[in-house]
């Protein structure tokens, strides 16, 4: 579809019309950082602001959330048809808002005005003010995505694209029966909707949604979502909900914002990979990947593998992270399912439910086991050091595999660059930095797990277990090859 646009500076009249108040702040479409990087649009201060001063005030009815979508549907029959057809989607904030953004895209397309669809609202102009070029990795070309091979971002992007394609297919299948959707979105001659439009709506939401307090949850907030990101102590503004329900942007406590200084918030992303996934960039001067999520799977030869995957209902992976003191740590609920089996006391049975259905039940030492209690049960077991050693080795092996993929793919990374001289320099540099940050992070995590493993091997419980199981040392306590 054609994406109608309103320059950022033209939003001032819209703000006045819709009771959005700017207190000594102006909207700018061209902000350049100190090192000469064009940051695009953002907010600039027109005067000096002290700690806790209000910078922006936005009415709650302009907060783009699930509730706002449902309210708009009450006065717009075309939107109501869409909401009723996709009722299950509207129950989740992301799908509700992404669907609504797609609808606003339709209303603002100048080539579709003859169809007389919908009721324009303040959100239609808001959509027109949003950028139509969002540099998230879901927009990378196939050649550019190849540069991500070996990083934790590669699988995340591939899975996200697959998920978005499935959503788009479901949207087409279920809305084909709606008259205006059939004509405007899907008809071979008059239909204008493409997968890229769905990508854009999703990217706008993921890169601009805020996690609002007081139970409002994830939503997009006009103007507040224009504030650029600054990390650590450098951000100077924060948002909250006022007593009257308005969203307020305030000067951060202990900060002062000077005239012609940029107003910045923190996006709060975890690791380097997540920052690129959600916002399309890395902060200046970032020195650590900070956090990684790696997938885990129960071994293919595990006789309980399918039952574990079905019953555990945990993300099948491990989160690696660095704490405030710089220590390499990990957390994973799933790994504990991967490291125990029948001989340890884990079993499953299928129960008949009162309504005639069937239910899978886990047992530990013959006692009923809830999905979220396995870790605490294992830590109360006299053999806990054995289970901790198994978990440590499983995660260490997964880190070694990821590190090897990252190292081996480096040659292909450099070859792809020479083969594609027109490669976007910003994309290349962002991925190059990510690759190095994640390799350093994996090496540090591997070393920390090696120390943890050696400590567990000195446990009396482990020593007695290995002495009684001569073959166990190969799978439970052998020295892994250092991928670095």
Image (cartoon, grey):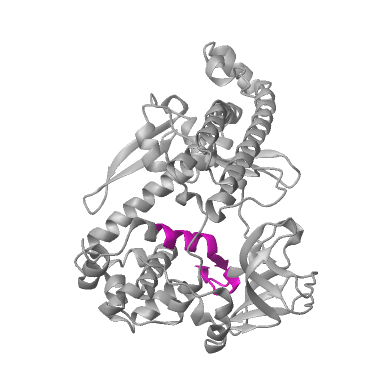
In the figure, is residue 409 to the left or right of 194?
right
Q: Quadrant of residue 363?
A: top left
Q: Is residue 213 above or below residue 200?
A: below
| Nearest to the observer: residue 35 or residue 222 | 35
Q: Is residue 364 above or below residue 301?
A: below
Q: Position of residue 182 (x, y in %)?
A: 21, 67
Q: Position of residue 354 (x, y in %)?
A: 25, 53
| Nearest to the observer: residue 175 or residue 345 | 175
| Nearest to the observer: residue 117 or residue 49 | 117
In percent of the image, x 46 and y 81: which residue is there?
122
Q: Residue furthest front?
A: 421
Number of callouts: 0
In which quadrant is the C terminus drawn? top right
Q: Quadrant of residue 466?
A: top right
In percent of the image, x 24 and y 49: which residue is there?
357
For the magenta stretch, what is the residue range?
A: 199-225
Q: Position of residue 278 (x, y in %)?
A: 54, 54
Residue 214 part of the magenta-drawn span = yes
Q: Is residue 318 above or below residue 302?
A: below
In percent of the image, x 35 and y 63: which residue is there?
89
Query: Is any part of residue 314 visible from this angle?
Result: no
In which quadrant is the N terminus drawn? bottom left
In the figure, is residue 233 to the left or right of 294?
right
Q: Position of residue 172 (x, y in %)?
A: 26, 60
Q: Quadrant of residue 119?
A: bottom left
Q: Is residue 128 above or below residue 340?
A: below
């Amino acid at each position: 579809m054609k994406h109608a646009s309103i320059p950022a500076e033209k939003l001032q009249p819209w703000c006045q019309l819709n009771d959005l108040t700017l207190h000594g702040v102006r909207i700018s479409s061209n902000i350049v950082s100190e090192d000469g990087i064009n940051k695009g649009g953002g907010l600039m201060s027109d005067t000096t602001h002290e700690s806790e001063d209000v910078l922006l005030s936005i009415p709650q009815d302009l907060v783009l959330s699930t509730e706002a979508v449902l309210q708009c549907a009450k006065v717009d029959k075309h939107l109501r048809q869409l909401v009723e057809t996709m009722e299950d989607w509207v129950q989740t904030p992301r799908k509700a808002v992404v669907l609504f953004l797609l609808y606003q895209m339709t209303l603002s397309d100048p080539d579709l005005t003859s169809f007389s669809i919908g009721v324009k609202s303040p959100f239609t102009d808001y959509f027109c003010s949003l950028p139509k070029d969002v540099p998230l990795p879901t927009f990378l070309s196939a050649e550019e995505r190849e540069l991500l091979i070996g990083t934790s971002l590669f699988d995340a992007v591939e899975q996200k694209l697959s998920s978005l394609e499935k959503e788009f297919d479901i949207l087409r299948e279920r809305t084909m029966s709606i008259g205006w959707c059939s004509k405007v979105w899907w008809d071979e001659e008059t239909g204008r909707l493409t997968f890229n439009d769905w990508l854009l709506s999703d990217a706008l939401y993921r890169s601009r949604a805020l996690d609002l307090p007081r139970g409002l949850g994830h939503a997009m907030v006009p103007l507040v979502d224009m504030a650029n990101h600054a990390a650590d102590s450098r951000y100077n503004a924060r948002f909250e909900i006022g007593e009257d329900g308005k969203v307020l942007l305030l000067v951060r406590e202990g900060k002062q914002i000077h005239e012609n200084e940029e107003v910045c918030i923190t996006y709060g992303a975890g690791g380097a990979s997540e920052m690129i996934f959600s916002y399309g960039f890395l902060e200046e001067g970032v020195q650590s990947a900070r956090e990684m999520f790696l997938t885990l799977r129960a071994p293919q030869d595990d006789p309980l593998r399918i039952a574990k995957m079905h019953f555990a209902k945990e993300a099948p992976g491990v989160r690696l992270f660095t704490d405030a003191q710089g220590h390499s740590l990990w957390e994973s609920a799933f790994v504990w399912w991967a490291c125990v089996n029948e001989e340890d006391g884990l079993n499953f049975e299928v129960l008949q439910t009162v309504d005639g259905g069937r239910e899978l039940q886990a047992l530990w030492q013959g006692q009923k086991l809830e999905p979220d209690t396995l870790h605490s049960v294992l830590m109360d077991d006299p053999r806990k050091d054995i289970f901790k050693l198994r978990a440590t080795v499983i995660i260490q092996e997964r880190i070694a595999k990821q590190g090897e993929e990252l190292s081996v793919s480096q040659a292909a990374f450099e070859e792809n660059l020479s083969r594609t001289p027109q490669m976007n320099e910003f994309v290349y540099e962002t991925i190059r930095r990510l690759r190095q940050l994640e390799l350093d992070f994996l090496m540090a995590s591997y070393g920390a797990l090696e120390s943890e493993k050696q400590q567990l091997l000195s446990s009396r419980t482990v020593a007695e277990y290995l002495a009684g199981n001569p073959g166990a040392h190969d799978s439970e306590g052998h020295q892994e090859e250092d991928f670095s």
